[in-house]
Image (cartoon, rainbow, N blue to C red):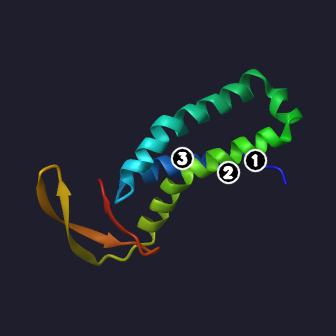
């Protein structure tokens, strides 16, 4: 099985969009994962593909490991986006702690059963 880059690009774009647009209990972890690992790893992957195009062609295990690792890093954002796009319009009142105060926020239950709040 050969991995194609359009699937990786689609997964990365939807992962970034889901991380930026959806706020839930795991939003901070997604930002940390993308900021510290996801962005540098995708830049390194495409820099190696551009600078040394034969390296990944001659080492299929390295290419497969890079694509699977990048896919796993961007997958939580894609799952959050899928959860939000398949959500019902009913809202739930939820009290969350923001700093030193408590705020009641309208949240939605997504299609995957996770609670979320759209940022914009």
Residue drawn at 41 percent across, 44 percent down: 31
From the image, which quarter does the N terminus lie in? Answer: bottom right
Picture quadrant of residue 113? bottom left
Distance from disc 3 to disc 2, alpha carbons, whole Å, reads 10 Å
Residue drawn at 36 percent across, 49 percent down: 28
x and y, in percent, of residue 41 in the image: 60, 34
Determine which of the numbered discs, if any, sits on residue 43 in the image.
none
> Of helix, strand and loop, which one carries label 1?
loop
Classify residue 77 as left or right of residue 65.
left
Distance from disc 2 to disc 1, alpha carbons, whole Å, reads 6 Å
Q: Of all residues shown, which one is farthest toward the left? A: 101
Q: Which residue in the protein does label 2 denote?
A: 7
15 is higher (above) or lower (below) than 57: below
Circle 3 Cα neighbour tier, 10 Å, few/some/many (<14 / 14–19 / ≥20)? some
Classify residue 16 as left or right of residue 71.
left
Circle 1 Cα neighbour tier, 10 Å, few/some/many (<14 / 14–19 / ≥20)? few
Q: Which residue in the protein does label 1 denote?
A: 4
Q: Are marks 2 and 1 in contact (CB under 8 Å)?
A: yes
x and y, in percent, of residue 20 in the image: 39, 48
Distance from disc 3 to disc 1, alpha carbons, whole Å, reads 15 Å
> Of helix, strand and loop, which one carries label 2?
helix
Q: Of all residues shown, which one is farthest toward the front? A: 100
Q: Which residue in the protein does label 3 denote?
A: 13
> Of helix, strand and loop, which one carries label 3?
helix
Residue drawn at 45 percent across, 60 percent down: 80
x and y, in percent, of residue 115 in the image: 35, 69
């Amino acid at each position: 099985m050969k991995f194609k880059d359009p699937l990786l690009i689609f997964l990365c774009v939807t992962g970034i969009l889901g991380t930026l647009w959806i706020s839930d209990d795991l939003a901070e972890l997604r930002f940390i994962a993308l900021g510290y690992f996801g962005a540098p790893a995708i830049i390194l992957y495409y820099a190696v593909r551009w600078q040394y195009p034969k390296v990944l062609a001659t080492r299929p295990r390295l290419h497969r490991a890079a694509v699977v690792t990048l896919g796993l890093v961007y997958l939580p954002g894609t799952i959050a986006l899928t959860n939000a796009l398949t959500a019902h319009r009913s809202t739930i009142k939820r009290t969350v702690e923001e700093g030193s105060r408590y705020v009641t926020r309208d949240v939605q239950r997504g299609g995957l059963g996770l609670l979320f709040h759209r940022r914009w």
